[in-house]
Amino acid sequence: MVLASEIRNGNTIKINDNLYKVISAEHKAGTAKMQSSVHLKLRNIETHTFTEQRLHPEERVENIEMETVSMEYIYHDGNDYYFMHPQTYEQFSFTKERLGNFTSFMTPGMKMKVELLEDKPIDIVLPKTVDLKVTSTGAGVKSDHGSAMKPAELENGIEIQVPQFINSGDMVRIDVQTQHYLDRVSK
């Protein structure tokens, strides 16, 4: 058990027999008329729905210790995406609904962090960026504008805009949320 005032972003807690991932924990100081409180934004690990909760700072909740293991994405079959545990070679799956739009960025061999509770996969930590190879892009054009961009197709089939100096075969870092180029990755 942990005090509500000790809850931090990323913690996994149990409230009313449900497991929640803490998205944000905001500690509000009290005033003369209002008591202090802890405002939590939570994601239900099982249903993937979001909720908010206000707790008194002295209230106790169950803190769940999760084991995090880097697993390798190996393949998908219909709606299920399979990952392999590096020590036991056991395979686990997550549904397309759980992975969301991130499935378009997944390539076999990609390492992702999976959270386990009693050796059972409970949640997956989706990266904010991915490194992908440029499969095709046009030749760079010299211009007065250093910020000129050109289209490039990535190994996963997504087309994005990249700077003129990027060539086919280069590895680039992409922001998953915005699908924008961030940086060229050295080989």
Image (cartoon, helix red, strand yellow):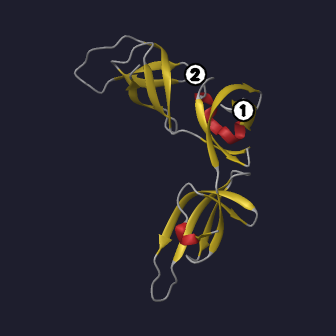
Q: Amino acid at mark 2?
A: Asn
How packed mark 2 is, by other alpha carbons closer than 10 Å (few <14, some 14-19, many 20 or more), is some
Callout in the foreground (2, 1) = 1
How packed mark 1 is, by other alpha carbons closer than 10 Å (few <14, some 14-19, many 20 or more), is few
Q: Amino acid at mark 1?
A: Thr
Residue depicted at 67% across the width and 32% down the height: 87
* Residue indicated by mark 2: 156
In the figure, is residue 112 to the left or right of 19? Answer: left
Q: Position of residue 177 (x, y in %)?
A: 52, 39
Q: CA distance from mark 2 to mark 1?
A: 29 Å
Q: Position of residue 157 (x, y in %)?
A: 57, 20
**Image quadrant of residue 149?**
top left
In the figure, is residue 67 to the left or right of 120? Answer: left
Q: Position of residue 125 (x, y in %)?
A: 60, 43
Q: Quadrant of the C terminus?
A: top left
In the figure, is residue 184 to the left or right of 41? Answer: left
Question: Which residue is nearer to you in this view: 72 or 118?
Answer: 118
Residue depicted at 60% across the width and 72% down the height: 54
In the figure, 93 relative to 1: above or below? Answer: above
Q: Secondary structure at mark 1?
A: loop
* Residue indicated by mark 1: 88
Residue that lies at the very extreme toward the left in this rendered image: 144
Q: Secondary structure at mark 2?
A: loop
Residue that lies at the very extreme toward the bottom in this rendered image: 32
Name which of mark 2 and mark 1 comes first in the sequence: 1
Q: Position of residue 11 (x, y in %)?
A: 58, 57
In the figure, 114 relative to 150: above or below? Answer: below
In the figure, 145 relative to 43: above or below? Answer: above
Question: Which residue is nearer to you in this view: 26 or 17?
Answer: 17
